[in-house]
Structure formats: structure tokens, C-alpha cells
Image (tube, helix red, strand yellow):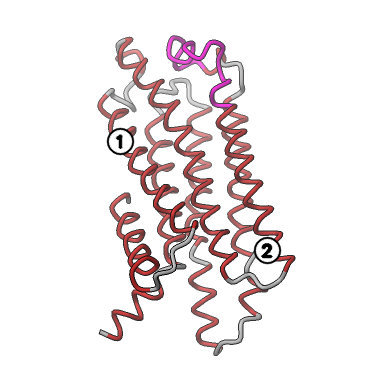
Amino acid sequence: MTGLALIFVVLRVISRFWIMRNPGMDDVLLILSTVVLCGFLASLAVSVHNHAGYPSVTLDAGNIEALSKTALLVEILYYFNICFIKCSILLTYLRFAVTRIFRRLCKGTIYFHVFLCIGSVVAVFSQTDPLSKMWTAAGDLNDYRINLAVLFYVTAGINIATDFWILVLPIKALSQIRRPRGEKIVLFCVFGAGLFASVASIVRLRSIAIYVNAEDHLRNSLSLLLWCMIEMSVAICCASVTGMRPIWLWIIRQ
């Protein structure tokens, strides 16, 4: 999934930086999100190395501490990456925004995601007092100052809701573009590619439910990490599609 996301981002970068020579902040954010995705992959490898998915009773103190510290890192990386991806999509919308209302809605949604990301990261750092208690009491969510189940459910629910909001946001603007009907259909399909990421977000919600309701959280953490990885990778691919048209046209001409 990481390799697929890298291919899509490279194709978009070629389209925007080399063919069109019109890069923007939306492209920069997608590149940053890919870097964060690679960091998430490295964290996932560290988790597997420390036996993520094994029963906690079979792990020593070093493994539990490493897994808990990695869990803290992946939570932060996930929230930042989702913010980067969605803000990139919204900045792409601003490229063809012609009405003041549409521009304000896009900018308002960007501000919302920035504040949501900041609030989520603050909540992650505030989950135990002191923070070191997170890895000394690993595996017992009752020792946490913040209800992690509520945090995960709320942020996941908001992300799913904003997925669909971002999908429907450009419909009116796209329908007003004066292009042949066939091209409009292609445009709607391209911008509707985010539906795949929304489906991945919904499936990830089920892995959250399994994780928070499990008696052994360390044993059930791996599936949650994997679905986070899948969700972010699919979202990056979907976000990249909107900027890849120039490279397909260039290939056809060649």
C-alpha cells in the first residue's frame, strides 16, 4: 500500500512540477503526507519487531515499553497525516473555486481540520499524567486519564463525516463547469475517488471497536495499525488522482 501511494504521488509530482510547472501547497502537503506515511510504516515495522499481536503475558517489559512508545508515535502521525491529506484535497478545490461561498466553505473546512488535528494531538499527549505512565501501565486503558475509546470513536466518526462532506462539496462547482458531458462525467469520477478512502475509514472503525473492547489491547493492536495504514495509503492515492490528468495526456500524445 505504501508503494502504491508513492507511485501515485510521484505521478502527480511529475504532472504538476514538470509538465504543468504549476505546483501548489496542495502538492507540498501530499508530499509531506507521503513522508509521514513512510514514518508510519517504519513505526509499524518497529511494532512487529517488538511482537505486536502477541499476548501481553508473553512480552517482557522492554517489548511493552517499546510498543507503548510506538503507539504514541503512530497516533500522532495518523492525525497529522489525515489533516495533510484532507487539506491537500481542499486546496485543490480552491484551484477551481469561482464563487465566494465555495471558497469560504473550503477554507472553513481546512481550518476545522487544522484545529481538529491540534486538539487530537493535545489529547494524545494528555492521556496519562505523567506521560511515562502510558508505557508503565500499558495494556490497561482504565489507567488513562482520557477515555481512549471515546477519543478514537469521536475522531473516527468526525473523519468519516468530513470524508463525505469533502466528497459532496465540489458537486455544484463541477456541474457549473462548461465542458462536454463526457468530460464532466470523468471529472465527477476523479473527484469521487475519495469514496474508496471513506470505505477504508468505515472498515477501520470496526477495528477500533475490536481494539477497545478487547481484554488484551496489545494483542489486538496490530489489525488497528494495519487498517490505519490502509486508510492513509488509499486516501493519498485518491488525493493524487485529481492532479494526474496532465501526465495521462502527455503519455497519450507521446
In the picture, the quarter occupied by the C terminus is bottom left
Question: Which region is colored magenta?
Answer: 123-140
Disc 2 versus disc 1: distance between alpha carbons?
A: 37 Å
Please state which amino acid type lies under the numbered disc 1: Ala
Residue 57 among magenta residues: no
Q: Is residue 71 above or below residue 232?
A: above
Which residue position holds label 2? Answer: 103
Q: Say which label, 2 or 1, has the lower sequence index.
A: 1
Provide residue 189's location: percent of width, then percent of height. 50, 73
Q: Is residue 20 above or below residue 218?
A: below
Mark 2 surroundings within 10 Å by alpha-carbon count, few (fewer than 14), some (14 through 19), many (20 or more): some
Camera-nearest residue between 183 and 53: 183
Provide residue 166's location: percent of width, then percent of height. 61, 59
- In the image, farthest residue toward the bottom: 180
Please state which amino acid type lies under the numbered disc 2: Arg
Which residue position holds label 1? Answer: 42
